[in-house]
Amino acid sequence: MSTIVHSLRDYRPPTRAQQFAHAFGLPPTEGPYVDEAGNRAEILSAILSLSNPDSNEVREDLVFAGRLTLTPSFLCYASQGDRGRGCRVAIPLATIRRVERLNTRDAVFALSITVWHGMQLVFQLNALRPSCEGFCNAMRDRLRAHLGEMKQLKPFLATCYSEALLQGALDTHVSAKGKHREDVQEGMGAATSSEPSSSLTPPSAPADETPMYQIGLGASFGFPGDPKKLKDKSKTRLWTEYLRTHGRNITIVRYPQFTRLVQVGLPNMLRGELWEVASGSIFQRMAHSGEYAAILKEHEGQSNTSMEEIEKDLNRSLPEYAAYQTPEGIETLRRVLVAYSWKNRELGYCQAMNIVVAALLIYMSEEQCFWMLDTLCERLLPGYYTQSMSGTLLDQKVFEHLVQQTMPVLHEHFIKYDMQLSIVTLPWLLSLYINSMPMVFAFRIVDCFMAFGSQVLFQIGLAILKINGEAILSVTDDGTLIGLLRNYFRTLGDSAYPESRDERRQQITRFQQLLVIGFREFGIITNDLVDQERKRFRQQIVQEIEGFARRSAIRNLKDYGHFSKAQVSLIYDHVVESIYRARNAPDSLTGGEKPVTVSDPKQDLKEMRVNFTTFRIFLSEMATWARDEYIVMNGLQERIERRIPDQTFARRLFDFWDREHCGSLTLQNIITGLDEIMFLDCDLAGTTAWFFRLHAGGKEKLSKNDVLALSESLLFMFRNEPGDEHLGSVSALITQAFELGDDESKTA
């Protein structure tokens, strides 16, 4: 449980550079570029116009004013007040093929940038000429630095389905049922459990005609829902036109139309790629091309502690979907989860991760899903898929507060009847609604979540409670509430206004009503507001989780020894504090030693483990002889500074308590070790015997070297004692020990 505590304590608010990277979905290493002179490559006022000839030679020109920023690998632009109604784009520098300055008036500085597929972006820079020249020079230098990456661009683009869609290179082979693969483009219906998976798998194309683009299990096993009812063909046509005009995959420009198309729903074959684009995980996949396969190959045949948990959950992952009733689907899910457990060894595998990954794999390939999972855990939903589920618990607290603010009557009802809202809403957040409502509707929510962020999870949750508010007020227990909402989810496809005389109004489904209420009535719930509320409740959640971790760790101890429960709790607090201090200790103290959770991925991360650095810090808090104290003065005041001396006695004690010889100590090891020496009740013989066992190393007798080591330990422990009486005692001990040893050797 130590990993839970110190990971929560280590939280730091994102820096401005990290906030910038998050806003554009860039890798965490990206931030505004600063040249050697310390100048930031950024134009605060720039006007973007887009020109791109489509197949009919029609040109579209849209103009937006905003900020243009250069990072080490991207050119980023965001219009003013970008809240879904503006323009935003992040262009990888490796995709830029031409940059030229346009012939404009003397007072106007304009750049024309052409990307690899011909789309042209024109930026008018409204700044002083030196600033414009500096920006252009920085951009020139960064473009030169990325010349080598341009050759790697073509193989990566071949993995994107949008390229095949726009080039008209879709496979048209006939499937096993006699249908063309055009049906796949429209979106195949989900297979029922009674149909064999092979009946939905199109025959293999010849090797030279096999498409290179990456796609999910849905292409073989069918996508959830009826493609005709979902109007998948119309959605594909709309997105095709948008991609032709506004760029595609890694160069897409997010205009207001992008937001509207996402809210309408994504087409099945494009959904996985558009999730990548909207979330920014496509940039991670591009930057680490081939890493997923390399991880699987490197750890082939190996095992870690996460794999046992993964195996337990594989058959519980969306069992209603046809692919996960076959070995192929299960093996695909296993590979992604195992690979991520090796990549993120401290996190490994956690609850609900299997549900989310199983859902993503319907629309994404293994590699796409792998990097999407990394983006979810690291940026979009930090703390959700961890041992403590700290992120989920924090958002649950935020959600309950938002319910109190927006629906006080409902909140008072929950309080009055002691109803636990978390029983219902925690699974919503943890599974992104995938495990709560029919998949065809849950994926629409995931579409919006990928594009607009975590605010969507709160907006939809609040809308669900508002729509069912009157019915909830008649419920007085948790079980009935769960049944009520389950019934609501089952009827999301029904008409929201069945008694209306207006036919168009009758056609509005309950799910459409849910989206309208969520985005309109709860549009005030923004990502900025969610972040503010998280900041308010974070410390409270940390304290609650630390309290739970303490109770669990103490409850799992096999033996308290002579300690009381209160004393064990105090020792636990000292150990946890030492773990935290060790994680932030300087190299001079750690000696380069890494935390147990990183150095040994096979270690059980759920059990508290203490390495030697942490043990030294713990000893310095528990025993005065394990630390040195100095008085430090700065001219105005003085303070006492503690330092931990480097001595072999601490290592000897650490190894003596390490009964399993695994290089780390458990809380039980520490409790047992302290119990042996703290309850001797001034028993001089017992203390001496323990001290001799410590230095004997399992032998029956001490050698001369052992006696010398024992004397050094005694001198170290009494070094801060006043006077020199201890020196005579240690000297007499050595003399008597050597004389006794000589007598025994003569007798022998």
Image: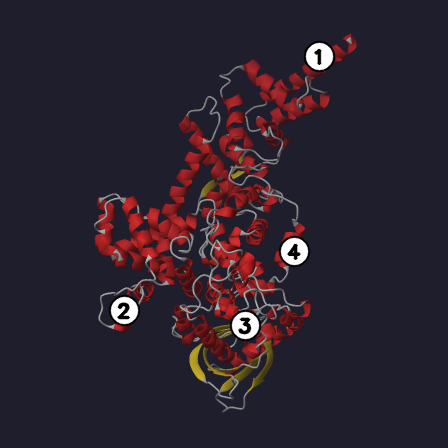
SS of the residue at dot 2? helix
Which residue is at the front of the view, 722 or 285?
285
Q: Nearer the viewer, mark 3 or mark 4?
A: 3
**Mark nearer the viewer, 3 or 2:** 2
Q: Which residue is mark 3?
A: 162
Q: Amino acid at mark 2?
A: Gln
Compare marks 3 and 4 and give the one earlier in the sequence: 3
Residue pointed to by mark 1: 740
Residue type at tag 3? Ser
Residue reaching furthest to the front: 178
Amino acid type assigned to the residue bearing label 4 in the image? Ala
Cα–Cα gap, marks 1 and 2: 102 Å
Per the image, the residue denoted by label 4 is: 294
Does the residue at mark 3 contact the one at mark 1 (Cβ under 8 Å)? no
Residue 455, quarter of the rendered image:
bottom left
Q: Position of residue 277 (x, y in %)?
A: 50, 67
List the residue tagged with mark 2.
506
Q: Amino acid at mark 1?
A: Leu
Residue 286 image point, x, y percent:
59, 65
Residue 477 quadrant: top left
For disc 1, the neighbor class at 10 Å (few under 14, some 14 to 19, many from 20) is few
Residue at the (37%, 49%) spot, across then down: 426
Front one among 276 and 162: 162
